[in-house]
Image (cartoon, rainbow, N blue to C red):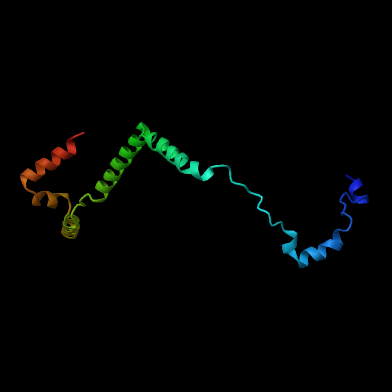
Amino acid sequence: MTDFKKQNPFKVPKGYFDQLEEQLIHPIDSISKLNPFSTPENYFEKLESALLQQTNNSVTSSKPSFKKIYYSITAAVAAILFLLTLTQQQPPIETEREQALNEFIESYYLEDFDGFEVYSMLEESEIETTINQILKP
């Protein structure tokens, strides 16, 4: 590695800089005018039949596989379920408003009452259902 510092490993061909100016001034002269590419014999005559043959092979071999059918059906079902969840009917807001109104009335009127006064305001059927709900484990 230390040898690189002492010697330059690259060499310039003889007369390179003498010809360089001329090549840069007249770049067209330095480019070969010959076409380096060649077309195989009867290429264009055989091209159409070769393309048709490849196309026919690919069309006949493109049968839908079980995986493709399974994934497409799964995607369709998932999309339908997603749409159904978006369009589910929400509970009406009026029910929430009625419940809030009832809670407000109860808290406003029953705020200063003790247990005996609340008990005296309830009907017997309400008392029984309330006690039954409390006693159920």
Residue 71: x and y in percent read 35, 37
Q: Quadrant of the N terminus?
A: top right
Q: Is residue 42 left or right of residue 6?
A: left
Residue 133: x and y in percent read 16, 39
Q: Name the foreground residue: 80 vs 68.
A: 68
Say if 41 sits above or below 66 in the image: below
Residue 61: x and y in percent read 39, 33
Q: Residue furthest bottom?
A: 25
Q: Residue at x 81, y 65 (%)?
A: 22
Where residue 94 sits, quadrant-wise, is: bottom left
Q: Residue at x 27, y 48 (%)?
A: 83
Say if 35 sits above or below 53 in the image: below
Q: Is residue 40 left or right of residue 77?
A: right
Q: Residue furthest right?
A: 6
Q: Quadrant of the C terminus?
A: top left
Where residue 57 sits, quadrant-wise, is: top left
Residue 36: x and y in percent read 66, 50
Q: Residue at x 63, y 49 (%)?
A: 37
Q: Is residue 41 left or right of residue 10?
A: left
Where residue 29 sits, quadrant-wise, is: bottom right
Q: Residue at x 19, y 52 (%)?
A: 91
Q: Name the foreground residue: 41 vs 55.
A: 41
Say if 102 sits above or below 67 in the image: below
Q: Is residue 110 left or right of residue 73?
A: left
Q: Residue furthest top?
A: 66
